[in-house]
Image: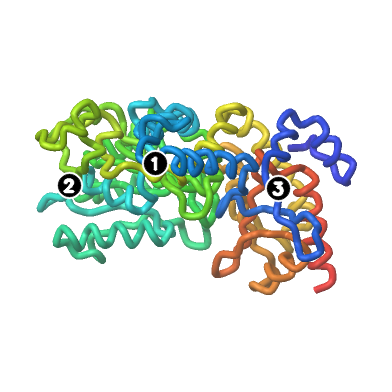
Amino acid sequence: MSNYKLGLDYALRQDQNDELKSYRNLFHIPKDTKGQTCIYMTGNSLGLQPKQTKSYINQELEDWANLGVKGHTEATNPWLTYHETLTESMAKIVGAKPLEVVIMNTLTANLHFMMVSFYRPTKTRHKILIESDAFPSDKYAIESQLRHHGQDYKSGVIQWKPRENEELLRYDDLEKILEVHGDDIALIMVGAVNYYTGQFLDLKRITKLGHKHGCTVGFDCAHGAGNVALELHDSGADFAVWCTYKYLNSGPGSLAGCFVHERHAYRNDLNRFTGWWSHNKQTRFNMRQEFEQLPGAEGWQLSNPPILSMAAIKASLDIFNEVGMEKLTKKSKKLTGYFQFLLQQLGEDTIRIITPNNPKERGCQLSIQVKDADKSLYGKLTHVGVISDWREPDVIRCAPVPLYNTFEDVYRLVDKLKSILRNA
């Protein structure tokens, strides 16, 4: 954008005029050994802790201490229905209907549970399409599902690859793959936002292509939930999974989210693993009833949810519910665009941004390659108070998160990087 300007004064003015500026104060920002506030740019890996998280968890600890088992029905936030209090907020974040969303398990566990239902291989249609540089856990999960079904995991995976000397995926290449192999592919499962490049894929376009060729379509939205407008319902995807500890700030290893499109909500023919929390709520505690499946995404639950983890999720979702994704994505585009603008001032012979240039094709993460740099550059940034993220072989990932990062953060990060490169 041509209206960005150089200089710290510009950054400070943008922060002063930012309608979301007060939300930074709701988060704990890490400090260095000298007590100086760090420039935290890794919300794409682990989001910062909301200050209210401790009180939300403490409320449940107090109710547990004072009520014991009665907390399931008498706690301030009754535990029996606790997960239901999160559903509407989460549905808004990922662009879904409440019927289509549930918070349960962890990310890769949810991916496996979804594949139990939506990967249904036959003799003629058994392959799985995935992007070539998918997050490793997705690859491992898919390979193990192929082995579980007696398929060869090497020949059973079809990779959607960038072209030679490119990093980003092209849709016409996906079309060609489906034209050739569409009748062999049972499932398309790709990352909505690629963890390495930051490319935000067109979920609706991919789903339409997949369904045209008779494939089931699912997405790993770990790097998309809370970052971009996923619009999962409108995408038409059969399912999606995501974690909550990146942009959704729920704490390390916290629970994950799951989406199942409403057209599958009342299907009883889908194979699935079940447990008592996917059984009819009205008769769940009668204990001896035959299984009666809950409709919607809740019908994929197994166990009663861990309340302490859900309390941390609620602390963050209450902030998201107040702000709304529309305002967050608006600031994100402006903040990330400013970041891109400043990096480009360092020169194309020094910095290469592999994340898409088009704001509609990315979230707030920029993946940066620095000419002739190795991991020592990441170490130098860490030494001067920048918490970023290194990914082999040569990428530094930085994510200016709109809830708590500022234009000043971005300015000072690039200024520190420029100083390091000047002294190298």
Residue 102: horizontal and vertical position, in percent?
Answer: 36, 36
Q: Give the residue at mark 1.
A: 68
Disc nearest the viewer among 1 and 2:
1
Disc nearest the viewer among 3 and 2:
2
Q: Is residue 368 visible?
A: yes
Amino acid residing under circle 2: Arg
Quarter of the image with the N terminus is top right
Disc 2 residue crowd, few under 14, some 14–19, many 20+, Cα 10 Å: some
Disc 3 residue crowd, few under 14, some 14–19, many 20+, Cα 10 Å: some
Q: CA distance from mark 1 to mark 2?
A: 43 Å
Q: Nearer the viewer, residue 168 or 204?
A: 204
Q: Residue at x 56, y 43 (%)?
A: 362
Could you tell which of marks 3 and 2 lies nearer the N-terminus?
Answer: 2
Q: Residue at x 61, y 47 (%)?
A: 49
Q: Nearer the viewer, residue 52 or 64?
A: 64
For numbered disc 2, what is the local secondary structure? loop
Q: Give the residue at mark 3.
A: 340
For numbered disc 1, what is the local secondary structure? helix
Instruction: Tell me where residue 423 sits by quadrant.
Output: bottom right
Up/down of 297 relative to 255, above or below: above
